[in-house]
Image (cartoon, rainbow, N blue to C red):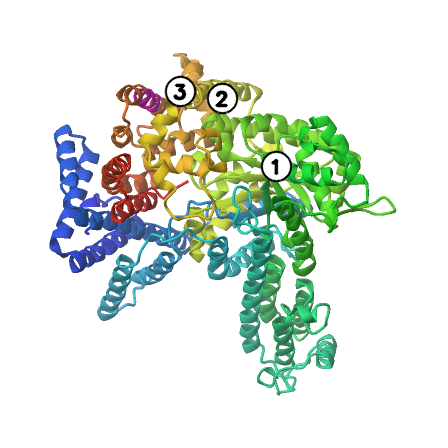
């Protein structure tokens, strides 16, 4: 499959961009060889013909060619069609690898050619700005001390790529980097091509579809993959770079940056709507995570052991080190194979004992014993003993290189690897509380109480030290499971450290009682306790998740109500006067549309921050962003800077979902750059929060304009989504919604309660289905009408929007998100999907409305940005989309054809043909890879 025809002239393009095209062409040609090898020249010719026609149509839409193009696709026999689908899908996988490699290459090229020039968006650029603005070292310490970012991996079903396929991608990527090696001989280059041919052939013969849904533990292991492959190495490197830059610009300080950047996980803890996540699974998750952490430390200690061959014949080690070895000898019996017998090499002796203690750490029978590490802090202390001794005989370079990094790794990952969040739906807690209180004859029907009555009762129960549960009561399975989760958290904090689980998220938080229920259950197992002297001990925080537009409106009042309760306020004080609050981008977008969701989230951030300030509580906002544009997806640094600076003081958490994990963290170079840019954004946001006069900022007038635009957009969006009785028919019949649910990419069901109601449809398949059908409707719909109503032909108002785009970060982010979605959408292809709708009146009426809104939105975006074409200001993204679209199009046309066939057979009561369904699922995978976006 050659890429030559898809390559535009590059004479005026930078050399690095030519290298990307070289790589795409190189891999495309290899895929072409594989196609001939596997399917003969006829297969390659079919693929090339379809690709050429698609590319020509992209350059100039000709109705006659369009009909011929569809006829060529329709004429493919099933076997050939299957292979053509796979050819295009695998092509995208190879393009994605080439683009990821190119991102690393561009950074290296910049660093190589820039000399002393500091790269924009780098950690050094952020620290350089602090210095240039005359910010003192004490204020820099405050800024660095205030930054905090936790990236939380989730197992939402949007990662369509199997682990086996990701492994092949890794090998291809590693081999492709060798192409840039100028020292390769002709024969070595040929051997490299042979290896890549072998990998692409393996990729062709590897099933990209899962034959079953992954289990929760499968998903846990998939998440751990990124820690094992990249994060253990990359994360401390980011800290090292920040300390290097601080040393460079503020050399008077001895910098050890506090832990500000870490990873967490929902995988194995998120039970909302997923009955497979049980207390037992949560415990198994934590055990697996500890196993990986211990394995990594063992590997690293063995590497350090090889390096520290210092001999006391030459140097003098510290008395502290010798004393620690003496203590180890008294308590630990080393196996002979690990006993270092050269008494003149004390570091190796000490490390031998440390390895033995590490091996004993997971042994339950040795709990509390000095034969094992009972906490990560104990391992850190042993490492500091070595560190201090090395510096004592001036081996500080060695200490900095080997020991300090290892100390940082233990600080970051502990014995729990990543903090695990627990999440559950508020209704589950209410049901369990109703049963528990009825059993104790406290209240017959807790669920029937009004909100004020619930708050009063729960507040009194929280202050009462007496238990509410008894081993003598038999509870329903759901209530027993609810209680078991809290017991598991208590046990886990004792075994893995209190940081292993400290946040309990409550989906659909709609009142203060939803929060108090969790705290009462926490009290029941000892996670919350009021001591006899009146002080409160609390190691678990209830975290509200405000998701819908109505929930966002209610959020400030709910938090004020909670903070006003003395016992609850004491629980917050016990957690350092810091409270975590999660805001959901997916459901708010599904509920109100992209414009309104973004505006209401901004309003909620400001209002909740103001509410907390009255009680001297700092907030850590947890932003539930998805990977897709319709679910708040955007680059990590932009998602940080999109927040009002004064709302980031307590720290930020952000979900990293689905395909985002593989695109950001499967390669060390990209993981580093992403985390470096995040650090730059954090430092920048912290500076602007401390010095607001340095921000261009919004005006009250701009806020009012944005508010009005949001209100209009909400009405327009809900007119279609909620008030048009035929909308759900249009959505279900013109997208692969039901078929998406058959793709085995997640352990969690696609719908809550097994319902067909729009309200119970999860936001992920909602966005996934619109993306597959090329509408991308959730990411842009209603914006055009809202902007048009504001402008109303007034040139001055259009000029105001242009100024807002240039100077108002919220509006800039919104407009750029909209144009990104418009660039990926394709209404010509979407019309083909609309052709599957049985009722012509519904089809024509709603599609015409969507098409009109698309054109209006596109036109206004161009006017506001002053661009000739969408994404002219983001040429890298624009070029990537342009390159991909001609290759995605054939998959879309084939998907429509296959969906028609499949649905017709099902309508006639015929059994599914496995190969037909498989082809549908292959197109879903291929389009997801092509658009680099699922849900």
| Other residues around mark 3 within 10 Å, as few (<14) / some (14–19) / many (≥20) | few
Give the mark nearer the N terminus: 3 vs 2. Answer: 2
Magenta region: 846-856
Element class at badge 2: helix
Q: Percent x, y for residue 364?
A: 66, 68
Q: Which mark is residue 725?
A: 3
The C terminus - image quarter: top left
Q: Is residue 771 above or below residue 675?
A: above
Q: How many marks?
A: 3
| Other residues around mark 2 within 10 Å, as few (<14) / some (14–19) / many (≥20) | many
Q: Which residue is mark 2?
A: 710
Q: Is residue 580 above or below residue 539?
A: above
The Cα atoms of the two marked residues, 1 and 3, are separated by: 30 Å
Q: Tell me where residue 734 sits by quadrant.
A: top left
Give the mark nearer the N terminus: 1 vs 3. Answer: 1
The Cα atoms of the two marked residues, 1 and 2, are separated by: 29 Å
Q: Which residue is mark 1?
A: 426
Q: Percent x, y for residue 717?
A: 43, 22
Is residue 504 visible from the viewing direction of this image? yes
**Closer to the camera: disc 1 or disc 2?**
1
């Amino acid at each position: 499959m050659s890429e030559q025809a898809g390559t535009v002239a590059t004479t005026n393009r930078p050399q690095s961009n030519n290298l990307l095209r070289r790589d795409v062409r190189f891999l495309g040609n290899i895929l072409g060889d594989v196609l001939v090898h596997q399917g003969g020249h006829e297969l390659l010719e079919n693929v090339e013909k379809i690709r050429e026609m698609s590319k020509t149509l992209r350059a100039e839409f000709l109705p006659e060619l369009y009909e011929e193009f569809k006829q060529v696709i329709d004429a493919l026999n099933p076997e050939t069609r299957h292979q053509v689908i796979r050819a295009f899908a695998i092509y995208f996988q190879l393009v994605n690898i080439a683009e990821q490699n190119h991102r690393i290459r561009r950074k290296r090229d910049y660093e190589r050619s820039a000399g002393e020039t500091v790269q924009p968006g780098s950690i050094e650029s952020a620290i350089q700005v602090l210095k240039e603005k005359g910010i003192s070292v004490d204020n820099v310490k405050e800024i660095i001390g205030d930054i905090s970012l936790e990236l939380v991996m989730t197992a939402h079903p949007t990662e369509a790529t199997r682990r086996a396929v990701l492994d092949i991608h890794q090998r291809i990527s590693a081999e492709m980097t060798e192409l840039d090696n100028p020292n390769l001989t002709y024969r070595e280059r040929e051997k490299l091509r042979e290896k890549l041919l072998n990998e692409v052939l393996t990729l062709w013969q590897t099933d990209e579809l899962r034959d079953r849904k992954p289990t929760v533990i499968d998903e846990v292991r998939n998440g751990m993959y990124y820690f094992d492959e990249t994060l253990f190495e990359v994360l401390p490197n980011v800290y090292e770079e920040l300390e290097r830059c601080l040393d460079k610009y503020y050399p008077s300080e001895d910098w050890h940056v506090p832990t500000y950047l870490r990873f967490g996980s929902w995988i194995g803890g998120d039970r909302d709507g997923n009955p497979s996540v049980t207390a037992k699974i949560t415990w198994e998750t934590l055990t697996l995570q500890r196993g990986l952490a211990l394995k990594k430390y063992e590997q690293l200690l063995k590497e350090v052991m090889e390096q520290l061959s210092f001999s006391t014949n030459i140097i003098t080690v510290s008395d502290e080190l010798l004393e620690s070895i003496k203590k180890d000898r008294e308590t630990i019996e080393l196996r002979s194979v690990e006993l270092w017998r050269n008494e003149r090499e004390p570091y190796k002796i000490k490390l031998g004992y440390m390895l033995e203690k590490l091996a004993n750490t997971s042994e339950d029978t040795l709990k509390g014993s000095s034969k094992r590490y009972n906490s990560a802090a104990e391992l850190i202390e042993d490492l500091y003993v070595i560190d201090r001794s090395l510096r004592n005989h001036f081996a500080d370079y060695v200490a900095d290189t080997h020991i300090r990094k290892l100390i940082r790794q233990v600080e970051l990952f502990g014995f729990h690897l990543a903090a695990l969040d627990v999440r559950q739906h508020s209704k589950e807690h209410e049901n369990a509380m109703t049963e528990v209180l009825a059993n104790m004859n406290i209240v017959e029907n807790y669920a029937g109480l009004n909100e004020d009555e619930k708050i009063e009762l729960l507040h009194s129960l929280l202050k009462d030290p007496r238990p509410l549960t008894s081993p003598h009561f038999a509870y329903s399975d759901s209530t027993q499971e609810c209680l078991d989760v809290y017991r598991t958290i208590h046990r886990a904090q004792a075994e893995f450290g209190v940081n292993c689980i400290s946040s309990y998220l409550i989906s659909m938080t709609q009142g203060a009682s939803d929060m108090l229920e969790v705290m009462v259950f926490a009290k029941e197992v000892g996670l919350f306790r009021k001591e006899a002297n009146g002080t409160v001990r609390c190691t678990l925080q209830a975290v509200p998740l405000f998701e819908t537009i109505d929930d966002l409106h209610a959020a400030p009042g709910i938090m004020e109500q909670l903070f006003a309760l003395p016992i609850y306020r004491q629980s917050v004080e016990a957690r350092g006067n810091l409270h975590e609050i999660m805001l959901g981008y997916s459901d708010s977008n599904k509920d109100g549309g992209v414009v309104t969701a973004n505006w209401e989230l901004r309003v909620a951030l400001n209002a909740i921050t103001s509410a907390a300030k009255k009680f001297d509580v700092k907030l850590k906002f947890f932003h539930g962003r998805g990977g897709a544009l319709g679910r708040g997806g955007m680059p990590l640094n932009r998602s940080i800077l999109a927040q009002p600076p004064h709302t980031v003081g307590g720290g930020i958490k952000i979900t990293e979902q689905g395909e985002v994990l593989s695109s950001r963290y499967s390669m060390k170079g990209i993981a580093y750059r992403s985390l470096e840019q995040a650090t730059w954004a954090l430092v920048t946001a912290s500076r602007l929060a401390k010095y607001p006069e340095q921000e261009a900022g919004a005006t009250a007038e701009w806020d009012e304009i944005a508010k009005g635009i949001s209100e209009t957009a909400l009405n327009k969006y809900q007119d279609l989504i909620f008030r048009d009785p035929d909308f759900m028919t249009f959505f279900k019949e013109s997208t692969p919604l039901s078929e998406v649910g058959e793709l085995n990419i997640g352990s969690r069901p696609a719908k809550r309660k097994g319902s067909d109601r729009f309200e119970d449809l999860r936001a992920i398949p909602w966005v996934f289905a619109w993306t597959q059908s090329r509408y991308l409707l959730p990411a842009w719909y209603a914006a055009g009408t809202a902007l048009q109503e504001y402008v109303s032909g007034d040139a001055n108002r259009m000029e105001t929007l242009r100024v807002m785009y240039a100077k108002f970060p919220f509006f800039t982010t919104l407009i750029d998100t909209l144009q990104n979605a418009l660039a990926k959408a394709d209404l010509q292809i979407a019309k083909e999907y609309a052709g599957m709708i049985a009722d012509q009146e519904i089809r024509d009426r709603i599609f015409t409305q969507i098409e009109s809104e698309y054109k209006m939105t596109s036109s206004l975006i161009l006017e506001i940005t002053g661009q000739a074409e969408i994404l002219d200001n983001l040429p890298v993204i624009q070029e990537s989309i342009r390159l991909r679209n001609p290759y995605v199009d054939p998959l879309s046309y084939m998907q429509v054809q296959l969906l028609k066939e499949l649905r017709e057979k099902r309508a006639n009561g015929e059994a599914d043909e496995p190969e037909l369904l498989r082809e549908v699922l292959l197109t879903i995978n291929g389009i997801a890879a092509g658009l680099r976006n699922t849900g």
